[in-house]
Amino acid sequence: MCTMIAVSAAVTGSGKGPTGWFPVTRATVGYDHGTHSGTEHALLLDFTNYDLGVDARVALELDLGSGRALMAQLQSAIEAAEAIEVPGDDAAIEVPGDDAGAREGSSGSSGGAVGEQGSR
Amino acid sequence: MWNSFKTDDRLGISAEITTYAAGNGDEIHAYVVRPLADAPVPGIVLVHHMPGWDEFYQEFAERLARHGYLVICPDLYCRYGHGTPDDVTAKVRSEGGVHDDSVVADCEAAALWLRGNASCNGKVGIIGTCSGGRHALLAASRVGEFDAVADLWGGGVIMAPDQLTPARPVAPIDYTAELDAPLLGIFGNDDQSPTPDQVDEHQAELERHGKSCEFHRYDGAGHGFFYYHTPMYRQEQAMDAWGKVFAFFETHLKS
């Protein structure tokens, strides 16, 4: 089945693709047919910058258990980071090659808040 | 039918990626496969699935052409840019999916392209799998250009109100009264979308409207059981269902 589950968020950071590092502007999380995983569906994580082309993409296909484990460890790492960082420093990531530089609440080429689009 | 050719038949196909004037007059890519033939042959619009305009669909088109059909398989994601199929699909997914209206317009234009082709006999069918099955049904229901339609495990034919989206605003079952083409349905009984109950509900709605439909349900198969490049492939069910597809198009497009 095509679930059509996909949600996106604007992000600020860098990803490493086949041609090297590039600034990523959007993260999309889906649960639908994968390309490489051997299951009918997979969690599909895409970190992209479509201003640079459709292949400016770092992709992951995970099973749901791995997604939960990743989410838990992301949460754990963020909480640990927040304990040692000054509030507001989360937006101060320098992104080489990104003209926007450090951005807070970055908006990607057409990104937005989590859950802004296409949920089913 | 599979392996029904004669070893001295004049067989062959030619295939290429070309462009055609699709919906809104946009020039988009299409994979076109032509059988060697002395006389005009039926045409088929092949509607690719959600994972994109990919290699499976190229081989799908070639198989149909080997059985005597002029096939056009439009790149429904062409307007999103170009890269590997999975990269393009990821972009389409991130933007909420391709709009139903866009797909219907591209399929209608593809049918007209076939009818305007000297090697087409004037009869045109449409077929797709997964989202392509749903889109094939949708196009055949909304556009009176098709002589036969085959929906292979298209999910989302029946949609609850909370499943409707800007890209998919109307459930295809709501167009049942407008469907004029005979419909072939191929489904796996282990599929979750469409579920066997949804298949039954769709068939009942077709019969209520007096529509010509032929549904085949397979035990031991789920979604995508033709996909020989995935663990979803089910050899016995797939080969039987391929026979059903060829027989259906033979009846409605070649007779």
Image (tube, coloured by chain):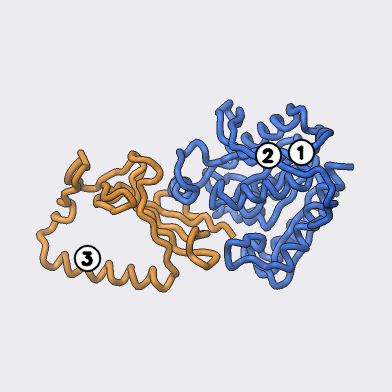
Chain colours: A orange, B blue
Name the N-terminal-most of marks 1 and 2: 2
Using the image, name the chain to which the residue with label 1 belongs. B
Q: Is residue B16 above or below residue B48?
A: above
The local crowd at label 2, few if under 14, some if 14 to 19, many if 20 or more residues have their Cα within 10 Å, is few
Same chain check for tags 2 and 3: no
Residue B141 visible, this angle: no
Q: Is residue B160 above or below residue B188?
A: above
Q: Are marks 1 and 2 in contact (CB under 8 Å)?
A: yes
Q: Which residue matches tag 1?
A: B36
Q: Which residue matches tag 2?
A: B14
Assign the C terminus of chain B to one quadrant of the image. Answer: top right
Assign the N terminus of chain B to one quadrant of the image. Answer: bottom right
Q: Is residue B5 left or right of residue A110?
A: right
**Distance (Cα) linking label 1 and label 3:** 62 Å
Q: Amino acid at mark 1?
A: Leu
**Distance (Cα) linking label 1 and label 2:** 8 Å
Using the image, name the chain to which the residue with label 3 belongs. A
- Identify which residue, B210 or A50, lies in the foreground: A50
Could you tell me which secondary element the residue under label 2 belongs to?
Answer: strand
Q: Residue A72: give x, y in percent of width and height.
A: 31, 71
Please tell me which residue is depicted at 13% across the width and 55% down the height of the picture: A89
Q: Which residue matches tag 3?
A: A78
Q: Is residue B82 left or right of residue B177?
A: left
Q: Residue B25: give x, y in percent of width and height.
A: 58, 26
